[in-house]
Image: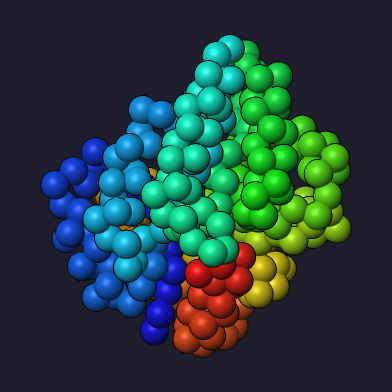
């Protein structure tokens, strides 16, 4: 079976020097493509270096992570734009900026407080406009901020994107679907005992679900607490199959088709 991990941090220091082994283990388990979210200028070079080392099986995103947004976020935005322009020139194709598949991971995160909430909202709105202007989907990181996010999306109707590590309600997902073309990213949390995400997954149509690991984080059971990686995607797919009452092959086929459609793979 073929899978796509739509969100993994292979350039994380947890895998330093082990990247080839990571990729090999993923391929052995049928994960044929891995998407790499951007964080900020401190990590961007390392992430794109992975994309350049493994161009057959990885694709990069570009964006400014909400946890990296502070009073100087516009300077970070300018660095992102400079990088984007260089990448477009060096990887030019007839259809756009080469291998960049999305603007992400971007969003809102109030878990550690709201000190930079206004800056996060401004950065998100700018990046939503940027994505729309370049005909790219968005990959959203959202934590403890659904109300503000929906308010912003109501001003940006018609976007297409993925709600990475979705933790919202079925009602919030249905509201998003009224405002654009949205998918939810489902990772290891769905395998956790008593995870509320399981109930949401039962209700969300399979053709709106993407598989992801967020490696090295959010490792699925029975390996919770250990380092996560893309090779564990079949455990997530298997749990979704149980919840939906379908064969794991259907989960693989449908989620791969979903990812291919959204990210233009």
- Please tell me which residue lies in front, 107 or 217: 107
Query: Residue 205 at what x, y percent from top left?
Result: 70, 73
Left or right for 183, reference 80: right
Residue 98 horizontal side relative to residue 228, left or right: right
- Asked if residue 23 shows in the view, the reply is yes
- In this rendering, would 211 be left or right of 16? right
Residue 186 position in % (x across, y down):
54, 60
Q: Residue furthest left?
A: 17
Q: Is residue 76 above or below residue 197?
A: above
Q: Position of residue 249 (x, y in %)?
A: 47, 86
Q: Note whether 51 is above or below 128 in the view shown.
A: below
Q: How is the image coloured?
A: rainbow
Q: Quadrant of residue 39 in the image?
A: top left
Between 8 and 143, the one lying in front of the other is 8
Q: Is residue 96 above or below residue 117?
A: below
Counting every numbered tag in the picture gives: 0
Residue appearing at x 20%, y 67% in the figure: 24
Which residue is drawn at the image coordinates 22% and 67% (left, top)?
A: 25
Which quadrant: the N terminus?
A: bottom left
Residue 239 seen in the current view: no
Identify which residue is drawn at 71% across, 68% down.
203
Residue at image x 70%, y 46%? 133
Give residue 154's position: percent from left, percent from top.
85, 43
């Amino acid at each position: 079976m073929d899978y796509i991990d739509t969100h993994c941090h292979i350039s994380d220091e947890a895998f330093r020097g082990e990247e080839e082994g990571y990729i090999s283990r993923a391929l052995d388990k049928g994960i044929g493509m891995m998407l790499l979210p951007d964080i900020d200028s401190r990590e961007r070079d390392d992430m794109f270096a992975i994309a350049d080392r493994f161009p057959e099986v990885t694709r990069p995103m570009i964006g400014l992570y909400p946890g990296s947004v502070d009073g100087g976020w516009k300077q970070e935005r300018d660095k992102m734009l400079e990088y984007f322009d260089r990448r477009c020139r060096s990887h030019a194709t007839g259809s756009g900026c080469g291998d960049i598949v999305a603007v992400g991971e971007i969003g809102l995160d109030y878990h550690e407080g709201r000190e930079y909430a206004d800056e996060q909202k401004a950065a998100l709105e700018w990046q939503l406009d940027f994505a729309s202007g370049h005909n790219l989907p968005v990959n959203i990181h959202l934590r403890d901020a659904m109300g503000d996010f929906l308010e912003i999306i109501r001003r940006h109707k018609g976007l297409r994107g993925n709600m990475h590590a979705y933790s919202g309600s079925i009602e919030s997902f249905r509201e998003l679907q009224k405002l654009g073309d949205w998918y939810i990213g489902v990772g290891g949390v769905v395998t956790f005992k008593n995870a509320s995400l399981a109930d949401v997954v039962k209700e969300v149509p399979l053709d709106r679900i993407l598989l992801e690991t967020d490696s090295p984080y959010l490792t699925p059971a029975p390996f919770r607490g250990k380092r996560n990686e893309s090779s564990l995607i079949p455990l997530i797919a298997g749990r979704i199959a149980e919840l939906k009452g379908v064969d794991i092959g259907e989960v693989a086929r449908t989620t791969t088709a979903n990812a291919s459609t959204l990210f233009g793979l």
